[in-house]
Image (cartoon, helix red, strand yellow):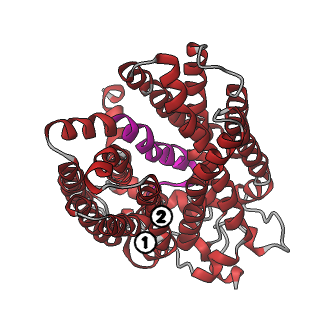
Amino acid sequence: MIERTSPVRRLSENKRWIYILPIVVFIYVICYIDRTNISFALPHLKTDMNLTGAQQGLASGIFFWGYLLLQIPGGYMAERWSARRWIAILMVLWSLAAMAQGLTHSIGQLLLARFLLGVAEGGVQPALMATIRAWFPFAERSRAFAIFKLYTPIAAIVAAPFSGVILTYFDWRWMFLIQGGAPLVIGLAAWLAVVRDTPAKARWLSQNEREYIERSRLEEGEPLVHHGTFKAAFTSRIVWRFALIYTMTQMGLLGLTLWLPSVLKKAFHTDLKVGLVAVLPQIAAGIAIILVGRSADRRGRHVAHMAVVLGAAAMILVGASFISADQKWLVLGAMILGTAASIAWYGPFWATVTKLTPVAAAGAGLGLINGVGNLGSFFGPYIGGWLSDISGGGYALTQAFFGAVFAIAALLVLTLRKPLRAATTHETADPAAPPLLPMAMDKKDFQ
């Protein structure tokens, strides 16, 4: 009887995995779709609003400038006030901005709606990350952040058919209204019903699980409550190192983004075939994210996991520069492996961030890393386009460059080995360098 009931008991004491993470993933899938669905609307906007190519690019890119504004305040508010209430407010604001895109009649109105959408969404990810940190000890965070990152392949798989169906039966205005409004109502209701700022406030959580979470975090040397400051985030060297690594990885992702549509189209010729094969890299990415996150939690060696994955992404991207569209199965294989490697580092990376970021920089530091890192997504297309132009319209030089970017990220990751080893053994890596002290240290150590 004990053997049969033990899985039930384990399930009852691991509710955070089936309560918190699915809602977090669902919310950010909506967020990601609302951010990227303009790519499906642009051909229609070009006709209806007579948009030039530059205006279309601005409408897509202005989101990221708004996105930067609440990154640092978003993490700060989640730590100092309430992640639950803060995210609920932002969800309402981003829903209104997303739906407002469907009511625009000029380029000025569209740009304003896109900018406000970026502002509202900018504070969401740091707050969600703060929520994950509050609910999962460091020994589980690589898996937790890996599951969170599933929003990327899920959104990539769902967005195209979801948008396509709406555009087939309605128009681009209804696409913005439906995708901005209806799913968010479900997400907001689920978020408010289930998620609490800390395990201690969740009535659905068993006493055993609550005690396990709190005891584990304390045993790992991490305080249960963080009270960070903006100054600590901006003056922490380790935070800026993480931001640089994240910027490199986001730029590297552009190597795949720029290469995928054009080369797959040349290799497989029809839109239908391209649509079918383009799903395979996303499926591979989802599997790789989970496997790497799980391995990092079980074996430790977070830095080694990140370095190996990023190094593999670098080699695949550089190698892909020598593949022609005629070698379609090599193209597809490179896309599958490259896409998987380019984002599988995510779980151990953010687990390491939450371990090494100083207590005083906790919330604002998450926002700074994510905000600065996303600048790579903004500048990457311009660099990639420039490299494509000077190479006569090909993508070989672009691929080689972004492969080199991943290689740099892998080398930077190796510099985290010593401070992470010190943090996980409750030792100080370098007494003369306070910004490198782990979260295990008390706030007064940073003053």
Q: Position of residue 322 (x, y in %)?
A: 72, 23
Q: Is residue 366 magenta?
A: no
Which quarter of the picture shows residue 8?
top left
* Mark toward the viewer: 1 or 2: 2
Q: Residue at x 44, y 21 (%)?
A: 277
Residue bounds of the magenta highlight: 135-157
Q: Position of residue 412 (x, y in %)?
A: 77, 52
Q: Residues within 10 Å of mark 2 (few under 14, many from 20)?
A: many
Q: Is the residue 373 above or below the residue 278 in the image?
A: below
Q: Residues within 10 Å of mark 1 (few under 14, many from 20)?
A: many
Task: Judge from the rendering whether residue 405 lies leftward or rightward of residue 135; answer left or right.
Answer: right
Main SS of the magenta part reads helix
Q: Disc 1 to disc 2, how far (Cα)?
A: 8 Å
Nearer to the camera, 395 or 284: 395
The amino acid marked with disc number 2 is Pro
Q: Position of residue 260 (x, y in %)?
A: 53, 31
Q: Secondary structure at mark 1?
A: helix
Q: Secondary structure at mark 2?
A: helix
Figure disc tally = 2
Asked if the residue at tag 2 contacts the one at tag 1, i.e. Cβ–Cβ closer than 8 Å, the answer is: yes
Q: Is the residue 423 above or below the residue 4 in the image?
A: below
Q: Residue at x 43, y 72 (%)?
A: 78
Task: Judge from the rendering whether residue 247 lies leftward or rightward of residue 68; answer left or right.
Answer: right
Is there any visible trace of residue 147 in the rendered image?
yes
**Residue that mark 1 sits on:** 78
Q: Residue at x 30, y 62 (%)?
A: 202
Task: Judge from the rendering whether residue 234 lies leftward or rightward of residue 38; answer left or right.
Answer: right
| Picture disc at residue 126 | 2
Q: Is the residue 219 above or below the residue 93 in the image?
A: above
